[in-house]
């Protein structure tokens, strides 16, 4: 069985836009051919989730900060599917390469 990519979406409270982004990201991951588990979180608890990728907004990225060994990427809007797909492409390809997917 292929390794699942663990993704955390981060918004202000972990309830609104990060949950909406989860649905969009699930579709994008299918396009990329990678199975993923996606958690929605707020900036304060995002670091507590073991993850392969954290996606947040440009406004919240400073609050999330840097996490050693985990890419933290930011988008202007979780609603922009093209922007999400574009910023996710490189970290997802890297995950696939590292895990022989």
Image (cartoon, grey):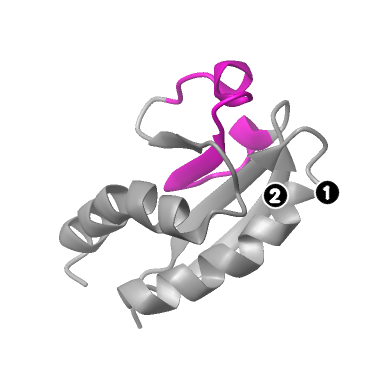
Q: Tell me residue 75's x, y (percent).
A: 50, 39
SS state under label 1: loop
Taking the image as shown, residue 91 lies to the left or right of residue 7, namely left
Q: Secondary structure at mark 2?
A: helix
Is 49 in the magenta? yes
Left or right of 98 in this view: 71: right
Write the start and end of the magenta stretch as one range.
Answer: 46-67
Q: Which residue is mark 1?
A: 15
| Res. 1 image quadrant | bottom left
Residue 97 appears left or right of 29: left
State if disc 2 and disc 1 touch (CB < 8 Å): yes
Residue at point 63% right, 18% down? 63
Across and down, in percent, residue 60 comes to 63, 25
The residue lying toward the viewer, choosing from 29 and 70, is 29
**Where is 1 relative to 84, above or below?**
below
Q: Is residue 62 above or below residue 29?
A: above
Question: Where does residue 81 sit, x and y in percent of width and height?
Answer: 50, 60
Circle 2 sits on which residue?
Answer: 18
């Amino acid at each position: 069985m292929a390794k699942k990519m663990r993704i955390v979406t981060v918004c202000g409270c972990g309830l609104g836009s990060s949950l909406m982004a989860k649905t969009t990201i699930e579709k994008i991951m299918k396009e990329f051919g990678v199975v993923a588990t996606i958690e929605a979180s707020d900036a304060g608890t995002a670091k507590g989730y073991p993850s392969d990728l954290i996606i947040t907004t440009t406004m919240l990225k400073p609050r999330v900060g840097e996490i050693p060994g985990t890419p933290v990427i930011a988008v202007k809007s979780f609603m922009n599917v093209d922007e999400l797909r574009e910023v996710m492409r490189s970290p997802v390809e890297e995950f696939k390469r590292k895990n022989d997917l």
